[in-house]
Amino acid sequence: MQPEVRDIIQRIETLATPLIEEEGIELWGVDFRPETGRWVLRLTLDREGGVSLDELTRVHRQLGDLLDAHDLIPWRYTLEVSSPGINRPLLRQRHYRRFCGERVRVQTQQEQQGRRVFVGKLKTVEDRHILVGDEAVGDIQIPWEDIRKATIEHDFWAAKGDKKKGRSH
């Protein structure tokens, strides 16, 4: 990521966080990148129990006004405000702690045991690493600096009750 873009994201986080927290919502993440020929600023918001569409719309308006008033971005962009969704990305250590015990998908930079993707229960979150009970290889310790991407891995089959994955009707 370009240093200028990283600086813009940091300034947006600093400016937006108090407004978002005033609404009782958490700033989950900020993404600012070019997409199909235009810049998109995407703020992801969450709280225990989720956020409503009305809340997202209200915060979108407030953030738009705030960002326009401070003129932090020197070029045209589109502002998007959304929730992280059911298979939400884990971006900060506090996200991992919040979802400890849940099923996750972790993609690593370096290969471990011949793989770079691990899916299973997030067992522990430590200062230097996480421990995932991978469904194929067992417990795998992954250092923070080796995590490329991690998401909650919602088990839709378990949510439907006794239906098994791959079973046809």
Image (cartoon, rainbow, N blue to C red):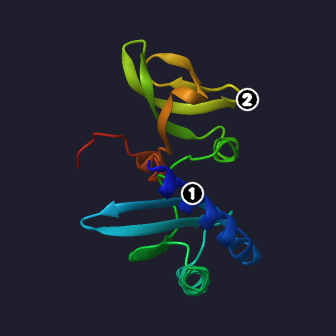
- 4 relative position to 21: left or right: left
In front of the other: 109 or 100: 109
> Residue beneath label 1, please?
7
Q: Specify the amino acid type for callout 2.
A: Asp
Which residue is pictured at 41% across the width and 47% down the height?
157
Instruction: Determine which quarter of the picture holds residue 69.
Output: bottom right
Mark 2 secondary-structure assignment: loop
Task: Find out whether the residues at labels 1 and 2 contact each other: C-beta distance under 8 Å.
Answer: no
Q: Is residue 38 above or below residue 149?
A: below
Which residue is pictured at 43% across the width and 27% down the height?
109
Q: Specify the amino acid type for callout 1.
A: Asp
Q: Earlier in the sequence, mark 1 or mark 2?
A: 1
Local crowd size for mark 1, using a 10 Å CA cut-off: few (<14), some (14–19), many (≥20): few
Instruction: Determine which quarter of the picture holds residue 75.
Output: bottom left
- The residue mark sitting in front, 1 or 2, is 1
> Residue beneath label 2, please?
127
Distance from disc 1 to disc 2, alpha carbons, whole Å, reads 26 Å
Which residue is pictured at 55% across the width and 79% down the height?
71
Measured as percent of width and height from the top left, residue 149 is found at 46, 39
Q: Is residue 48 above or below residue 138?
A: below
Measured as percent of width and height from the top left, residue 162 is found at 44, 45
The answer to whether residue 88 is seen in the rendering is no
Q: How many marks?
A: 2
The answer to whether residue 37 is seen in the rendering is yes
